[in-house]
């Protein structure tokens, strides 16, 4: 598995665990690093910090593009993978847009429901289509 794919998986783990525990993701990340259990790839930290920093706007867009699905009704893994994918799609200049979408789909492929890959692909694909007209 490529290093960035592993970093995305680790970021998903950190963000998901923080949400389930009601913790702040960056604080959870920093605690894990301090305890020697943190990520070894700096891109994990970039993703956790980026998703956290832009979460309000990311969630607004996800709510808009996930037609018929409220964020709090989505499977938590899907919601977290969508946040990572949206961050990369909208804010990470060094990630090709199709890669951001396909990597988010890959995250949910083995970790969520059978319908999750097509759902994540649809939401992020629609965001990608409108990306240039979105206000960030």
Image (cartoon, rainbow, N blue to C red):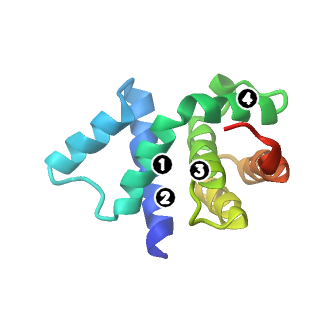
Q: CA distance from mark 2 to mark 4?
A: 22 Å
Q: Secondary structure at mark 1?
A: helix
At a point 24% along the width and 42% down the height, the residue shown is: 30
Q: Is residue 136 visible?
A: yes
Label 1 – label 4 distance at C-alpha: 19 Å
> Percent position (x, y) of residue 23?
35, 27
Asked if marks 4 and 3 touch (Cβ < 8 Å), the reply is no
Q: Which mark is residue 47?
A: none
2 or 3: tag closer to the N-terminus: 2
Foreground tag (2 vs 3): 3
Mark found first going from the N terminus, 4 or 3: 4
Q: State the image quarter where residue 42 is shown.
A: bottom left
Q: Are marks 2 and 3 in contact (CB under 8 Å)?
A: no
Quadrant where the C terminus is found in the figure: top right
Mark 3 vs mark 1, foreground winner is 3
**Residue where numbered disc 3 is placed:** 91
Would you place residue 93 above or below residue 113 in this image? Answer: below
User: Mark on residue 12?
Assistant: 1
- Say which mark, if any, is on residue 63: 4
Pointer 2 with pointer 1, Cβ within 8 A: yes
Residue 119, percent across and down?
78, 46
Which element carries disc 2, helix, strand or loop? helix
Q: Judge whether residue 66 can be spotted in this image.
A: no
**Residue under circle 2?**
8
Q: Residue at x 30, y 43 (%)?
A: 29
């Amino acid at each position: 598995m490529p290093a960035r794919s592993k970093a995305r998986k680790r970021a998903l783990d950190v963000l998901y665990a923080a949400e389930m525990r009601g913790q702040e993701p960056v604080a959870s990340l920093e605690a894990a690093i301090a305890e020697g259990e943190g990520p070894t790839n700096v891109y994990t930290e970039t993703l956790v910090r980026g998703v956290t920093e832009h979460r309000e706007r990311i969630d607004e867009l996800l709510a808009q593009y996930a037609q018929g699905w409220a964020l709090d009704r989505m499977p938590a893994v899907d919601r977290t993978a969508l946040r990572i994918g949206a961050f990369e799609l909208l804010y990470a200049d060094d990630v090709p847009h199709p890669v951001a979408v396909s990597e988010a789909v890959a995250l949910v492929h083995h970790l969520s429901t059978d319908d999750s890959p097509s759902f994540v692909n649809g939401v992020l694909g629609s965001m990608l289509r409108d990306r240039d007209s979105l206000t960030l």
